[in-house]
Image: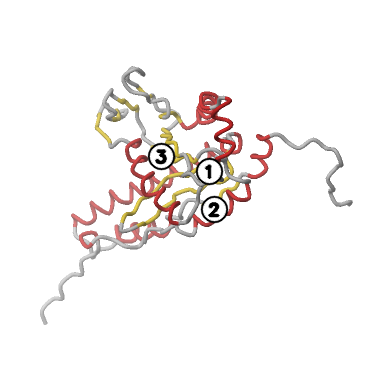
Amino acid sequence: MKACRPTPGRRKCGWNEYCKAKILIIKKADDKTSKLELLEELKKSSSSNAHPKDCLAEELHNICHDIRGEKTRTFILTPVIPTIRIHAVLNDFRISIDGETTQIDHVLIGRFFVFLVETRNFNGNVTINEHGEFSVKYPNGKQIGTPSPLEQSCGHERIFLKLLKRLDIRTFSGTPLKVEHIVLFWHKSIIKRPDAKKLDTSNIIKADALRTWHNRFMERQFSIFKTLVWGINAFRSGETIREWTEKSKRQHRPAYLLELPDFMKPQMLAAAPI
């Protein structure tokens, strides 16, 4: 079979095709299997009293929920990401800088933007009020408040930009990277929003709407002036993005999954007197 050779005069592929060819999952989500197995063993152990076992059961439920959520996000996002001008992806990215630690669900790195993505896998419908407060109503009718994932993502940005500065990662002109935030909810959830004039929630969407959202976002952002400025500030190439993403990946600090708080550790039974 003849080796593939470039055809003289062949038209270069468009930007979308270029991105599809270059997309790289630089970092996958951390494997939580070891933590799951540890919790299951401790739950069965007779050396734990009732209170820690209740905590273990709750933690076990949370880990299983996280794993299911990661599988769902992977199923939904994998076919979408190559279509939205993204070069590299860091999943489950945990960093520590100057004593501060943060964990970002997904970092999507493109030529013009870096998107910090927070995902929520609620089995219920989401309400956002005009003050940016979130609540979830579950099928059993119970409604509870939940921390704002958007505010959480904004908190991630400060530490993330500190990391990029330390690694000397910046645009061609030397300016800091432009960071945008996206919150993705379970695609079966119903999102009840406030009036857009009171609070813009356009970057809070269902996971399967990411491609449509991104296309509209880029259309709003692009103009002759902005295109010129972004062209100057953009990365040099997809390869540069890959190199910088690999450099960032080396700063990932995974949580020690086998570590448990003292109250959750099994308590040894006192020896019977002789």
Residue 170: percent from left, percent from top: 50, 48
What residue is disc 2 on?
244
Would residue 88 appear left or right of 251 to someone viewing this image? Answer: right
The image quadrant where one finds the C terminus is bottom left
Instruction: Check disc 1 and report its element: helix, strand or loop.
Output: strand
Would residue 84 appear left or right of 200 to someone viewing this image? Answer: right
Q: CA distance from mark 3 to mark 2?
A: 22 Å
Outermost residue to the right: 2
Front in this rendered view, residue 98 or 190? 98
Residue 185: percent from left, percent from top: 41, 33
Cβ–Cβ under 8 Å for marks 2 and 1 = yes
What is the three-letter code of the residue carrying label 2? Trp
Q: Which callout, 3 or 2, points at the residue further toward the start of the chain?
A: 3
Q: Residue at x 10, y 79 (%)?
A: 273
The answer to which quarter of the image holds residue 50 is: bottom left
What is the three-letter code of the residue carrying label 1? Ile
Q: Which callout, 1 or 3, points at the residue further toward the start of the chain?
A: 1
What is the three-letter code of the residue carrying label 3? Glu
Residue 208: percent from left, percent from top: 50, 30
What residue is disc 1 on?
109
Q: Which callout, 2 or 1, points at the residue further toward the start of the chain?
A: 1
Q: Residue at x 40, y 55 (%)?
A: 95
Residue 193: percent from left, percent from top: 34, 21
What residue is disc 3 on?
118
